[in-house]
Image (cartoon, grey):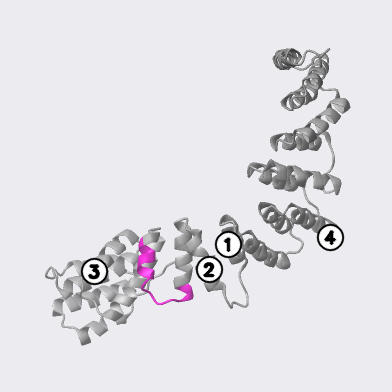
Amino acid sequence: MRRWFLAVSISAALVAPLAAAQSIAPDVFRALQSSQVAQQAGKFAQAEQALQAVKPKAGSLEQTLIWRSQGYLFWAQGKNTAAIKVLTQAFNSGQLTDEQLTEDRLNLAKLNFAAKNYQQALTYLQKTAQSNEVLEMQIEAWQGLGRLDQALPLAERYLKGKSRIEDNWLQFMVGANAELKRYAEAQGWQKRILQRSPDSVNAWKQLAALQQMANQNTKALATLRTAYSKGIEFKQADLDSLIALASASGQPWQAARLLAGMLSNGLMQTSLATQERLAQLHWQARDYPRAAKQYRQLAQQTGKGQHWLSLAQLEIQQGRWRAGLQALNAAEKTGANSQQVQAWRDWAQSRVDLDKQANPIASQ
């Protein structure tokens, strides 16, 4: 999607039709013509002096035409704020012809758009004849206001029937649909990007991420496997970011399933770090049995006190007090933090004692 670079060219049409259709005081007419000639020559100071030399009557047609000429002169110099002010005065004066109003309405939309006055720009554009130029401004204005729900239908209309769509528009359609949680549509546009760039890691990764957002973990994994089978190499950071996306979205169980699938399919190397991460994700997802199984394997593999302590916490969270106490004993022997071990032991032991009191026969 392109940004607007506005250039202004004032032709003789600005003044000549006025002389034929409207009665203008001679001194004002000469000032308008002199200003126009100077502006076309790039002599902006001289153009301003010509307009300032006349003092039209307040509320008159002459005053409106002076405002209008000043507005386009300011715009030509990049003084957009001043241009908006005087062109708005002329536009609202009630003195301009329909043709002039049509021209100024579009130009005021452009000026307000350039100044990021998006709501005002949209107001002018509502009564402007539709064209690709107008549609582009409307789309970007709604986007600037954070209203992708308004921008997206206009973008679909803009792109409809185009034989060739620029890459930046494809990216916009992917991002806008994803932001609005229209994941199926976003995937459709992303597949068009993938058709153009079948060897792009980012294109494959983006499609997998969109599938993951739609809770289609199996499809996301299949997408990555397909890319992998084509010989496309993923960096560890690429796969890590996909896992992090699911975890950050508040759905760690998705991240856990995706990571487990990657490990079992050889997309990610099994290591101590990935095993720890999988255990943590299952813990975050409250899948305590799987997390406990993984931490037990890690503790037996590494002998680290922290792994035994994590296992103890998981066993205790499941109400498995004696298993938790056994893990705490192992954690203490392998150098886990003694204060943490004692705190968890006190809790687990108190629950064991309560169970004994509640079921004295069963505890014998």
Q: Are marks 2 and 3 in contact (CB under 8 Å)?
A: no
Coordinates of residue 68 in the picture (x, y in percent)? 26, 71
Amino acid on which disc 2 is placed: Ala
For disc 3, the marked residue is: 92
Alpha carbon distance from label 1 to label 2:
9 Å
> Which is nearer the N-term, disc 4 or disc 3?
3
Q: Is residue 44 visible?
A: yes
Label 3 Cα neighbours within 10 Å, binned few <14 / some 14-19 / many ≥20 = few
Name the secondary structure under disc 2. Answer: helix
Name of the residue lying farthest toward the left: 57
Above or below for 256 versus 97: above
Give the residues drawn in magenta, as a range: 120-133
Q: Nearer the viewer, residue 16 or 348?
A: 348
Quadrant of the rendering where the C terminus is positioned: top right
- Badge 1 marks a residue whose secondary structure is helix
Indicate the position of residue 347 as horizontal and vertical percent values.
70, 16
| 169 with respect to 80 (left or right) | right
Residue at the spot of label 1: 172
Q: Nearer the viewer, residue 242 or 238?
A: 242
**Residue 301 appears in which quarter of the rendering?**
top right
Q: Please say if the residues under marks 1 and 2 sit with CB atoms less than 8 Å apart.
A: yes
